[in-house]
Image (tube, rainbow, N blue to C red):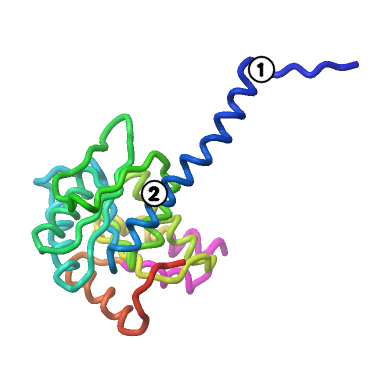
């Protein structure tokens, strides 16, 4: 009779995986309870590596300030760079400033512009991304790296597949995003991998005023609520 051999520690791994469910559940419960109280907000994404003297940092501060002056709060990933700029703009504008922090081996640390009662910590990226999507009335996407692209394309996919309600997705910085947007319009569309109407899910702008025009125009026609 054949004897099944399993790697050493296999049972311990399976047990640890099972117990992780409770930690994941705890992050969801805490996130839902606290985020449900923040009111209408717009998420701002972008690189953690952008320095305060960079033009996109300064632009993110301006965009965030205009957002809160128009009645929205701001949600960021809670770290440095563009995230810090988003929270700084919200703070300067006297609006709600939320930080969804993630523990990373580098780059990530809380920035000082998050409201003291609106700073949440996460171990799991996927739980954190649910909070962004569920409690945002729009995504403002500044120049960033892989993490920014991940959050951008997940939101587009969820809207495209009708898993969540549509909300504005606004790319800020035509100099940075223009090449990607052109590739989407030509390569992806011409290959038949997206539909022409999918292009309407993305807006490309360069100023805070344009961001506000898109947000306010969209919400003249629909109410503000969590997205699923």
Residue occupying the point 36% across, 45% down: 147
**Extreme residue in the right direction:** 1
- Report whether residue 25 is seen: yes
Tell me the tag on residue 7. Answer: 1
Q: Residue at x 43, y 71 (%)?
A: 166
* Residue 78 drawn at (x, y percent): 25, 47
Stretch in magenta: 184-203
- State the residue position of label 2: 128
Residue 75 vertical position relative to residue 3 in the rendered view, above or below = below
- Badge 2 marks a residue whose secondary structure is helix
**Lower sequence index among marks 1 and 2:** 1
Relative to 187, is 202 above or below?
Answer: below
User: In the drawing, does residue 90 fall left or right of residue 120?
Assistant: left
Residue 63 visible, this angle: no
Q: Main secondary structure of the magenta part?
A: helix
Q: Position of residue 217 (x, y in %)?
A: 29, 80
Q: Say the numbered circle drawn on residue 25.
A: none
């Amino acid at each position: 009779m054949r004897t099944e051999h399993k790697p050493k520690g296999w049972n311990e791994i399976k047990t640890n995986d099972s117990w992780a469910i409770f930690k994941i559940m705890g992050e969801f419960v805490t996130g839902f309870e606290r985020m449900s109280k923040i009111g209408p907000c717009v998420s701002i994404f972008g690189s953690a590596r952008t320095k305060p003297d960079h033009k996109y940092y300064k632009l993110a501060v301006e965009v965030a300030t205009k957002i809160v002056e128009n009645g929205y709060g701001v949600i960021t990933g809670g770290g440095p760079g563009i995230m810090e700029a988003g929270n700084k703009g919200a703070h300067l504008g006297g609006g709600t400033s939320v930080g969804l922090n993630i523990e990373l081996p580098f780059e990530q640390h809380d920035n000082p512009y998050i409201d003291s009662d609106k700073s949440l910590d996460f171990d799991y990226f996927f739980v954190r991304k649910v909070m962004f999507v569920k409690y945002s009335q729009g995504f403002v996407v500044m120049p960033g790296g892989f993490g920014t692209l991940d959050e951008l394309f997940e939101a587009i996919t969820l809207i495209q597949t009708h898993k969540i309600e549509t909300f504005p997705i606004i790319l800020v910085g035509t100099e940075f995003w223009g090449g990607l947007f052109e590739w989407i319009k030509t390569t992806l569309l011409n290959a038949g991998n997206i539909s022409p109407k999918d292009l309407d899910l993305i807006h490309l702008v360069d100023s805070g005023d344009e961001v506000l025009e898109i947000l306010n125009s969209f919400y003249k026609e629909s109410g503000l609520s969590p997205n699923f």
